[in-house]
Amino acid sequence: MTNDQIMTTETMTTATTRDTQVFDLIAKEQHRQESGIELIASENFVSPAVLEAAGSVLTNKYAEGLPGKRYYGGCEVVDQVEQIAIDRAKELFGASWANVQPHSGANANMAVFLACLKPGDTILGFDLSHGGHLTHGSSVNISGKYFRPTFYGVERETGVIDYDKVEETAMREGPKMMICGASAYSRDWDYARLRAIADQIGALLLADISHPAGLIAKGLLNDPLDHVHIATTTTHKTLRGTRGGLIMLRNDFENPFGIKTPKGELRMMSSLLDSGVFPGTQGGPLEHIIAAKAVAFGEALTDDFAAYASRVQANAQAMARAFTDRGYSIISGGTDNHLMLIDLRSKGNHLTGKLAENTLIKADITINKNMVPFDDKSPMVTSGMRVGTAAMTTRGLVESDMERIVVYIDEVLTNHDNDAKILAIREEINEWMKAFPLYQV
Ligand code: DSN
């Protein structure tokens, strides 16, 4: 290729000669999202504005550092974008400090660990097999490999956390950091009690609010920031933003590890956390994604979003009632938030999470298999399924629709070996979903 044959962005666009191999698949995925029922509790559908920001030219910009303190030139515009994201995150959660750069919830947690822990330190998290998260000490994750993980869980009889037992475990294990928050726990958290426990043993308390963040932001669940030292979240679940992470403090504080500034003053925790993100665990921030976070936080600040979050919660309660009415056992007996974990053994031991996931997808209903507490099956099979209402509420479905979804799920699972029946249900669902358009193409 000679110099005058080199493509400019203009010729790249016209010649974008569409990379059909990829763009056809994107179109196919859009069709999949639009024609089915999405119940994965960690997923949602962003607005066209969030999508536009995420696909913007900001992806071209390197901006290591923080607004006003970058290692590259030309950051005047992205500085403003990132500052808007920070300011909106603070307003949304009543935080005094926020870092919007983590690429994901896992990265946000890793940055906190780097800022607060040393290899070998003990951490105390909610057991993954009881509904906790991989990054809270699982042996296959860096959090379980670099630190000494210890765990609390739920009670077998109630499916609920017994905070007296958390206290016993904390006193026995002496963690440097306690972590609350979960991927599959449908009950609210007693952050005040956890802070009292952390204070007794001199531990830091981290709340990972990735799942219920949108409900917390709108005051529908207990406010962790009133009590915990540090909070992390993803931005894409009930918060309905682009995929990403966020770290927040309501009250900044001098770090308890004696780390000083060059002037000999104790560094504030916000400064250690900023360093934990960059240069500690990440390089250049994704400014296009930060712009998308800013747009999503702006949406979440509206009254419309408050109505949405209430509807998510009401829909989850309606769905839980419908499952219970049909004989399905929900861990803890119900839900306070947007999700529930169903023990499928209540419908016969043949019905595993794997079978449910693989069968429901044939009807264009997407769920994920999930371990239930004290599960007798492996993580690749499981006895449970997790469902959530954030995504379908975005599409406009209401409480009566949740009952209809549960009827479909029950029919598919009851007829898991009847492909003709499942196909007929899929056609009904595809037709039904046409009434809830997602993106106008
Ligand atoms: N994958 C997320 C979830 O499904 O809860 C957690 O990382």
Image (cartoon, grey):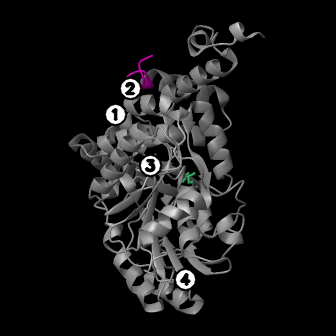
Q: Which amino acid does label 1 sit on?
A: Gly
Which secondary structure dominates the residues rendered in magenta? loop
Q: Residue furthest left?
A: 303
Circles 1, 2 touching at the beta carbon (< 8 Å): yes
User: Within the magenta stretch, is there residue 435?
Assistant: yes
SS at badge 2: loop
* Mark 4 / mark 3, whichever is N-terminal: 4
Q: How far apart are marks 1 and 2 (CA)?
A: 7 Å
Residue 8, x across and y down, in percent: 61, 14
Name which residue lies at 48% across and 75% down.
261
Q: Which residue is drawn at 59% across and 62% down?
A: 280
Q: How far apart are marks 4 and 1 (CA)?
A: 44 Å
Q: Residue at x 55, y 87 (%)?
A: 169
> In this rendering, would 133 be left or right of 260?
right
Q: What element carries label 3?
A: loop
x 62%, y 45%: residue: 356
Q: Give the range drawn in magenta.
A: 433-441
Q: Pointer 2 and pointer 3: residues touching (CB < 8 Å)?
A: no
Amino acid found under the numbered disc labelled 3: Thr
User: Mark 1 = which residue?
Assistant: 396
Please identify, in this view, whether the residue under mark 3 or under mark 1 is nearer the observer.
Answer: 3
Q: What x and y, as percent, mark residue 81?
A: 38, 41
Q: Which mark is residue 235?
A: 3
The C terminus - image quarter: top left
